[in-house]
Image (cartoon, coloured by chain):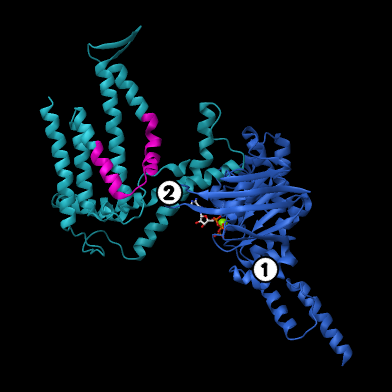
Amino acid sequence: MLKDITIGQYFPGDSVIHRMDPRFKIVCTLLLIVTLFAGNSLWTLVIGGVFVLLVQILSRIPGKLLWKSLRPILPILLFTAVLNLLFVGDDEVLWEWQFIKLTMGGLQMSVFMIVRIILLIVGSSLLTYTTSPILLTDAIESLMSPLKGIKFPVHEMAMMMSIALRFIPTLIEETDKIMSAQKARGATLDSGKVMERIRALIPILVPLFVSAFRRAEELATAMECRCYRGGEGRTRLRQLKAGARDYIGFAVSFLFMAGAVTVNILSK
Amino acid sequence: MAILTTEGLTYTYSAGTPFEKTAVDHVDISIEDNTMCGVIGHTGSGKSTLMQHFNGLLKPTEGKVFLEGKDIWADKSRMRDVRFRVGLVFQYPEYQLFEETVYRDIAFGPKNMGLSDDEIRHRIHETAQMLGLTEDMLKRSPFALSGGQKRRAAIAGVMAMRPKVLILDEPCAGLDPRGRAEMLCQIRDYQRKTQSTVLLVSHSMEDVAEFTDKLLVMSKAKLFCYDDTAVVFRRAEELKALGLRVPQIASVMGALRKCGYDLPPDLYTVEKARDALLSLLRKGAAEC
Ligand SMILES: Nc1ncnc2c1ncn2[C@@H]1O[C@H](COP(=O)(O)OP(=O)(O)OP(=O)(O)O)[C@@H](O)[C@H]1O
Ligand SMILES: [Mg+2]
């Protein structure tokens, strides 16, 4: 079950999307997110959906994987949908029962919210699925490098991010292992009252923290042994270089988003 | 009587993703009660995966697992009971210790079984003694023990549940030679005393040769064979082809036999080999 968490996971491949410059991919994803949340007409969402679908087909990431990344957030999705349904309202009442009032506006809002969140998750999953964590942080560092001017520790931030990303799967695996081991000793994790459930977490959290700290210490030592001293004067093995393909990809994405925004303005 | 049986057991990791991997492939096996069974196989051959099916931690993609003749997945609500009857100690179990004292950590399993405090105390002391943990260690924090002592504490946590089948995944990994020998002796004594079944996953042919009655050999997710240890080690050439080997002493004896010395075929422990060589030498001296 924990293995189903695919956040930050990378699925190697050799598609056009995989090979695109990660900086452009990040910018395109940001564009998508902004468009999705700025637009409030049906067409914005349709264009956004087509764009995401196009990227998915080009990247050859199986739909099943995207479904997997969506599954953990289903409860949140439902929750937002219900909230919107109940608390956003206009005059067009569809159904009424005591104090509960369902309106057309609420229904519209909750459908929009669901589609937006789904597209948001799928879009950003496509980014992480097709970009290795190392490239991703390289790209973030490169995009944020102007901030170095105001003494913002860009390199350190990027390094911290790449370490965190790198260790998500490791920690998940470790949690899985510890859970299995405690289950083998008869621990019950999914039944009982709230207090019992909280208490049942102790046998998992204690070993997990102990091993996370141990890992952190080992990693720090290993980095120091290789004379890591922060970003000063550090060169890279992989230089990010944008080519014609990246500009074309970016242009296409930009056109999509521009189209979505135009449609949004026109439809008002 | 067979205690653990599998039928067409198959398990695939990450089915439906690019990382799909069949780690156990149609394994049919039947393990007897009251045996010390070694489990060997090349790295990645699926040993650990197979072991996790025996107590229901992994659900077979295909096939069935029977414990004392009953399908363990027939009634999910009895799964906990299965876990108490089949104890599993993972590789590097010392990373699972969590309690304030060693005593309380060992008590975790028996407590989950709902045993009385007296019974728990009795079992802990008995187990601690079997594994060479002193009274003083029981009172300490598990994090203040040495690596080998931590390992023992973690193993004791499962042994104290007195499972019918105890599975140990490489219990000696990372121990010094003396620690290994001690640990293996203690495990064998435990097996003899409790008359239970112990499955011992190991990479050391010398260890399994000396301490096990039966051997289960895995190769590339398939069961290669399951037989008496002596019988398995007679198939030296085939084992070599799997990336395994026979104990060093067995190779030496095999080479001597090829040179024409009259030695029996199943000499795979140092002791037996020594006795055979001594008797051969005496015979030689008598003939001179
Ligand atoms: N959690 C997992 N997810 C995906 N694949 C896995 C996982 N665990 C193991 N595998 C794969 O399954 C195969 C069998 O692994 P397993 O751990 O059972 O081997 P093993 O025989 O115990 O090896 P070792 O002797 O190194 O412990 C390996 O190829 C491994 O890559
Ligand atoms: Mg293993």
The disc label shown at residue B206, or none: 1
Q: Amino acid at mark 2?
A: Thr
Q: Is residue B3 above or below residue A265?
A: below
Judge left or right: residue B15 versus residue A243.
right
Residue A154 in sight here = no
Q: Label 2: chain?
A: B
Find disc 2 in the rendering and name its residue: B17
Task: Give the main secondary structure, helix, strand or loop, of the magenta stretch.
Answer: helix
- Mark 1–mark 2 CB contact (< 8 Å): no
Q: Is residue B156 magenta?
A: no
Image mark 1: chain: B
Which corner quadrant of the image does residue B161 belong to?
Answer: top right
Quadrant assignment, res A112: top left
* Residue B53 seen in render: yes
Q: Can you tell which chain is drawn cyan?
A: A
Chain B representation colour: blue
Sequence order check, earlier mark of 1 and 2 = 2
Residue furthest out toward the top: A98
- At 69% from the left edge and 70% from the top edge, which residue is drawn? B235
- Going by the numbered disc 1, the residue's amino acid type is Glu
Q: Give how far across and how far down residue B129 sits, in percent.
A: 72, 51
Start and end of the magenta stretch?
A: A49-76
As drawn, is A261 to the left or to the right of B18?
left
Residue in front for this viewpoint, A257 or B125: A257
